[in-house]
Amino acid sequence: MSNQVISFDYVLTAKDGRVIDASTKGKPLIFITDRGQIISGLESILSEMQPLQKKTVTVEAKEAYGIYDERLVYKVNRSKLPAPEIKIGDMFEVGQGGSFSAVTITAINGDEITLDGNHPLAGEDLTFTVEIVNKRPATAEELAHGHVHGTGHGHECGGEGSC
């Protein structure tokens, strides 16, 4: 069903079993379906689940953060970077005009810096243990604003026009 507000608890693990991310106890992740607010593979699974249902699922890389793309790895001169002090693992945005993307420094060889524009989890199949906390239709106001209101866990709207 389209335009549902789904709140869910989760634990995200990599293939090797390490925990990558998790919701905080009592603070589920909340999103509106069909808005691209979470990875598509997970959204389709959650959309089929019912409140209080638990499940462990694996989302393939192509439906998570995409297949790793070697074309997004490139080298630049250190002088092109926004900060004089850098280290491997630093992330920042590159681009111009209204088009920006995140990159990660993956190698430093003197003044030659290797940047990777892939998401850090690109190419990885991800395992989620999820539990649906609640599901409900999104309100007209939430649909107009593109985010969930009145959750106590994020964006709150006050009076008229304050969102």
Image: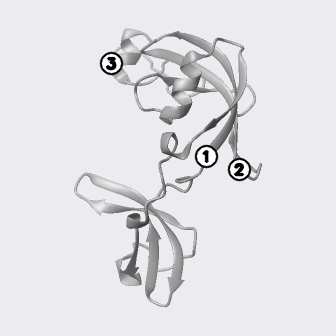
Q: Quadrant of the C terminus?
A: top left
Q: Residues within 10 Å of mark 2 (few under 14, many from 20)?
A: few
User: Which disc is residue 144 wearing?
Assistant: 3
Tell me if residue 67 comes above or below residue 37 in the rendering: below
Residue positioned most to the left: 97
The residue under label 2 is which amino acid type? Lys
Q: Is 110 left or right of 27, judged from the image as shown?
A: left
User: Where does residue 12 sit, x and y in percent of width and height?
Assistant: 68, 40
**Is residue 108 placed above or below 52 in the rendered structure?**
below
Coloring scheme used: one colour
Neighbor class of circle 3 (other Cα within 10 Å; few <14, some 14-19, many 20+) is: few
First along the sequence among labels 2 and 3: 2
Q: From the viewer's perspective, is residue 111 above or below residue 8?
A: below
Residue at image location 58% in from the left, 12% down from the top: 135
Residue carrying label 1: 125
Q: Where in the figure is residue 58, as x and y percent of width and height?
A: 65, 37
Toward which corner of the image does residue 88 lie, by quadrant?
bottom right
Name the residue rendered at 22%, 56% in the picture: 97
Q: Secondary structure at mark 2?
A: loop
